[in-house]
Image: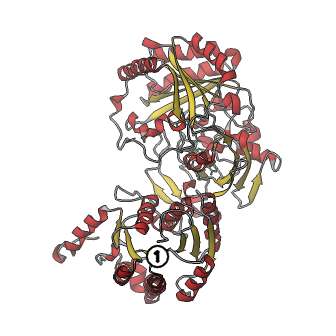
């Protein structure tokens, strides 16, 4: 099994400039991984690639690509051909959007759904096909606790993540007999550029480094759905089970 | 604040002393390409300041009237040559991160302050010094190049040869010459991650001077903890160390063993508790006296084991005082400083005494200079504490000494100008866009 801890692990990161992806990549780099960083912003990805090489990555190559628009299967094939194989895919891109704007601007809502769900699904399906055929590999997908229950403040974003959750769950089921795996990671509140505008972050907020460590571990073993940090499993169990009569009175 | 601003107003952005409490407009970029837009941001119209991990105690890392750029998100390494020990990294990389990368490869920082939670940018902007000043000089002596973004958007590379004037102004330049984007540094080779440490309790300042003198030749690192409470005044614990070849190259872990999650009540650190602590510390070290092998994290960074230890001082925070006095007047000046503290009835919890060597820094505004330095921290008791510090200022001034801006939140303009005789030359090199609460106090 090639997704073992250690050097030479071949990893493709989709959305490599996200804070969580970068934190995870640093762990893989320190283990001597061979990484392909896919991101729209090539210059930023290059800065990350240089950093990862200093940190010990055997290789860190950049593919500048608009993931939401690309032909996932063909691009993935090309990357794997260059890497000479594939052990891990981390899908980490997605847009948060502004709920109010999304509610009034259908084009914006559609674009968010296309990015977060439609295009992400294509990448997941392409990776799953490859992993099933080779009977190994780990597909790691970053979802969100926002997908666990729709709430007024971010249900369009939440819906895309809920859709992705069902997809990854299904892929995990399909891959189970082969030895390959699919894992959905559900971060709670993470202090990244995506959430920078939110001031006064409290005790529920996690550092991307902590979430990255959970993801790197999830690549090795564990359940098909991983909350990061783990206490969110309990929080979301409660949130999911609050009766609508009460839930609808909250402003969440 | 303008709605289109990338800066967010925050009430929780404090310097390490936790005394100055003014809201700061803060942005935390992650990539160098985000910086130019921040220069033009409406929140930065008045002025801008790059800041690091906020380990400076007073107001030199705050800019209440403008905006601050938290550089800690710019934490990418750029290049490292494990053969030559040349490291280039973005300014927001911390010394802690540097060590985790380079120690396993046999390298260490050329010099280090008493905490590893300092950014490269902050280390350059205060031209920080360490226990090996007599051997290595200050941090600025080891900076080979740096990238500076000026307020008008110009990106410059500075080195002792290229743009040498601006290089000299930026080393110890308190962030006022522009935003340091990256730093290139020459590291020092080590034989293991451990030091051979000798701990020597001493009974009087005379003994301290004798120890300091005999140690600088033979030991790379020297420092003393000093007791300035009346009961034990003059005594202390001297420690001196050299890197050893015995041991592996294991870097420190990330975990602190304790966190100080809330402010302790202000009365916790008073004369009695500090005297008791000093007594304990002195006795404990008398038992421990002798030679021990210590990991660098124990020797250089004992306080880093407790996160947020500054909260020990309660809500009103603490005031630091650090001066250097030249050799010619060092002995009487230290006697007088210690006497003034003992008489004041105020307690300094962490008192550090050390001698500096004569390796000159390239920095125009560098603090270390040949002589002896004393660092004290006092719980903030308002007027009473400020009055004592005024007396310490007077002794320092009399001795021809200087104060350290990184540790200050209250020095007078006059004291500043006496401390940094080249300040006018520096003011010429200052970037008109950059400013800080400290600079407004000193130069306005
Ligand atoms: C426990 C403890 C022990 C210490 N021991 C020592 C010691 O032994 N020797 C010593 O010299 N100091 C010591 N210090 C002080 C500390 O080393 C300095 O204050 C250091 O500059 C802090 O770096 P920082 O990253 O926290 O920067 P900050 O405190 O956030 O900022 C410090 C200055 O650097 C500027 N700055 C920061 N980043 C940039 C950048 N990218 N570009 C331009 N300007 C920038 C800021 O504007 C400010 O003027 C100690 C502090 C503590 C808390």
Residue B17: tell me if it is visible. no
Above or below, A67 against B205 in this view is below
Q: Residue at x 46, y 71 (%)?
A: A1
Q: Quadrant of residue B395?
A: top right
Query: Could you tell me residue B163's position as x and y percent?
Result: 81, 50
Residue A86: tell me if it is visible. yes
Q: Residue at x 81, y 46 (%)?
A: B164
Above or below, A198 against B269 in this view is below
Q: Quadrant of residue B154?
A: bottom right
Query: Is the C terminus of chain B in the top left, top right, bottom left or bottom right quadrant?
Result: top right
**Crowd band around label 1 with a 10 angstrom C-alpha radius: few (<14), some (14–19), many (20+):** many
Tally the marks. 1
Q: Residue at x 46, y 76 (%)?
A: A137
Query: Could you tell me residue B237's position as x and y percent?
Result: 51, 19
Would residue A11 be found to the left or right of residue A135 on screen? right
Query: Could you tell me residue B307's position as x and y percent?
Result: 43, 42
Answer with the quadrant where ligand 1 appears in the image: top right
Residue that protrudes farthest toward the front in the picture: A1
Above or below, B26 against B344 in this view is below
Q: Quadrant of residue B329?
A: top right
Above or below, B83 against A158 in this view is above
Give the structural element (helix, strand or loop) at label 1. Answer: loop
Residue at mark 1: chain: A
Query: Could you tell me residue B191's position as x and y percent?
Result: 63, 38
Task: Name the residue tied to disc 1.
Answer: A137
């Amino acid at each position: 099994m090639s997704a073992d801890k250690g050097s030479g692990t071949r990893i493709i990161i989709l959305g490599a400039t996200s804070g969580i992806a970068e934190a995870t990549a640093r762990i893989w780099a320190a283990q001597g991984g061979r990484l392909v960083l896919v991101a729209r912003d090539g210059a930023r990805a290059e800065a990350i690639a240089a950093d990862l090489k200093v940190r010990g990555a055997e290789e860190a190559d950049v593919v500048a690509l608009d993931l939401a628009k690309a032909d996932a299967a063909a691009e993935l094939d090309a990357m794997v051909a260059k890497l000479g194989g594939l052990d891990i895919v981390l899908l980490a891109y997605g847009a948060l959007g502004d709920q109010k704007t999304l509610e009034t601007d259908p084009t914006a809502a559609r674009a968010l759904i296309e990015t977060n769900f439609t295009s992400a699904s294509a990448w997941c399906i392409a990776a799953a096909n490859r992993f099933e055929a080779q009977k190994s590999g780990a597909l790691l997908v970053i979802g969100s606790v926002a997908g666990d229950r729709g709430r007024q403040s971010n249900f369009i974003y939440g819906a895309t993540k809920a859709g992705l959750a069902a997809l990854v769950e299904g892929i995990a089921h399909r891959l189970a007999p082969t030895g390959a795996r699919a894992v959905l990671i559900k971060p709670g509140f993470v202090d990244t550029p995506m959430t920078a505008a939110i001031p006064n972050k409290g005790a529920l907020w996690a550092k991307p480094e902590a979430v990255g460590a959970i993801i790197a571990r999830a690549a090795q073993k564990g359940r098909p759905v991983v909350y990061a940090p783990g206490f969110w499993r309990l929080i979301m169990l409660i949130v999911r089970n609050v009766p609508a009569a009460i839930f609808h009175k909250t402003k969440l | 604040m303008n709605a289109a601003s990338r800066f967010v107003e925050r009430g929780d952005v404090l310097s390490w002393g936790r005394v100055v409490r003014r809201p700061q407009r803060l942005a935390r970029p992650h990539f160098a390409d985000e910086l130019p837009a921040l220069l033009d941001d409406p929140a930065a119209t008045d002025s801008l300041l790059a800041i690091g991990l906020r380990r400076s105690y007073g107001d030199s890392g705050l800019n209440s009237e403008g905006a601050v750029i938290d550089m800690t998100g710019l934490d990418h390494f750029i290049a490292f040559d494990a053969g030559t020990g040349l490291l280039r990294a973005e300014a927001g990389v911390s010394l802690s991160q540097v060590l985790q990368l380079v120690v396993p490869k046999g390298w260490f920082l050329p010099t280090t302050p008493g905490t590893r939670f300092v950014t490269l940018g902050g280390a350059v902007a205060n031209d920080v010094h360490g226990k090996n000043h007599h051997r290595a000089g200050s941090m600025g002596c080891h900076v080979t190049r740096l990238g500076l973004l000026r307020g008008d958007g110009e990106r410059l590379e500075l080195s002792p040869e290229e743009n040498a004037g601006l290089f000299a102004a930026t080393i110890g330049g308190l962030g006022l010459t522009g935003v340091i984007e990256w730093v290139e540094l020459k590291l020092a080779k080590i034989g293991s991650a451990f030091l051979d440490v000798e701990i020597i309790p001493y009974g009087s300042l005379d003994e301290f001077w004798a120890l300091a003198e005999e140690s600088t030749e033979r030991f790379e690192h020297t420092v003393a903890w000093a007791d300035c409470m009346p009961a034990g005044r003059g005594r202390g614990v001297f420690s001196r160390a050299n890197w050893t070849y015995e041991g592996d190259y294991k870097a420190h872990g990330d975990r602190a063993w304790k966190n100080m999650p809330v402010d302790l009540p202000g009365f916790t650190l008073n004369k009695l508790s500090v005297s008791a602590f000093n007594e304990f510390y002195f006795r404990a070290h008398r038992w421990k006296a002798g030679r021990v092998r210590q990991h660098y994290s124990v020797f250089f960074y004992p306080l880093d084991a407790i996160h947020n230890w500054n909260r020990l001082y309660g809500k009103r925070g603490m005031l630091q005082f650090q001066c250097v006095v030249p050799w010619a007047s060092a002995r009487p000046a230290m006697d007088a400083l210690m006497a003034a503290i003992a008489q004041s009835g105020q307690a300094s919890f962490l008192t550090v005494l050390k001698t500096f060597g004569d390796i000159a820094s390239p920095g125009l505004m560098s603090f270390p200079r040949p002589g002896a330095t004393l660092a004290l921290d006092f719980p903030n008791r308002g007027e009473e504490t400020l009055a004592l510090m005024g007396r310490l200022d007077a002794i320092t001034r009399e001795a021809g000494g200087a104060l350290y801006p990184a540790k200050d939140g209250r020095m007078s303009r006059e004291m500043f100008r006496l401390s940094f005789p080249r300040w006018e030359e520096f003011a010429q090199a200052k970037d008109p866009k950059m400013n800080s609460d400290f600079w407004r106090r000193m130069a306005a």
